[in-house]
Amino acid sequence: MARNRDENKRRAILQASKLLFAQKGFYGTAISDIVRETGMTVGTIYTYFSSKDEIVKAIVEEGWSELYSRLETDLGAAGSAENKLRLLIERFLPEVVRDVELISILLSEAVTYTRLEEKVERLTDLVFSLTRSLAAGSRPLEGFTRHTMRTALVVIFLGILSTVRIARASSLGISNDDIISVVKMLARESLRIDL
């Protein structure tokens, strides 16, 4: 007989797993850790997820899908390319940097399960299209190809994520607001627009 599924239990498993993966690493976390953290049985965990791999995929995919869907909706209503860039930097990026657990998972050994490449490609298409619109008629990004944009996004995005994680674990005195300010300054100076 199949067990009934309770969405609250599923969410509790995902939340506990997310915290454990961020603290102990993907490989350092065992199903028994998730059992202990949730207070559920092994059988209950396996009712919702067939493996630890499936849990980490769900954490990243569901979190990313929700965030990206909101971003696309908001961008559709933002109007000008400048407003879209502002939205990307002032709303999307702060949401990402607040989720330190997800950052830790993305930067950990679990990266092989998170389809990071697909996420980078979608962001590259979005940002490349946006910067092309902003740079039309001016020369600030002359010679900037899609490949260059992809490389820049990976360097900047992974640098931001690493900075957030290191800043939280140390006394560097760098806040999320500091990081967002630097990104705004870089965008403003490279595109020569007022943000």
Image (cartoon, rainbow, N blue to C red):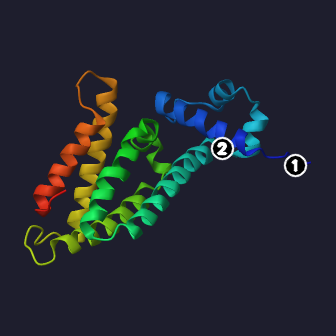
Residue 78, position as x, y percentages in the image: 35, 66
- 22 up-or-down from 159: above or below: above
User: How busy is the neighbourhood of tag 1: few (under 14 within 10 Å), some, or many (20 plus)?
Assistant: few
At x 35%, y 45%, the residue is: 94
Residue bearing mark 2: 51
- Camera-nearest residue between 16 and 182: 182
Q: Spatial distance from mark 1 to mark 2, Cα to Cα?
A: 18 Å
Amino acid at circle 2: Ser
At x 65%, y 44%, the residue is: 51
The residue lying furthest to the bottom in this view is 137
At x 69%, y 42%, the residue is: 10
User: Is residue 121 left or right of 187 when viewed as pictured?
Assistant: right
Q: Check disc 2 and report its element: helix, strand or loop.
A: loop
Residue 81, position as x, y percentages in the image: 26, 69
- 149 up-or-down from 107: above or below: below
- Residue 2: which disc? 1
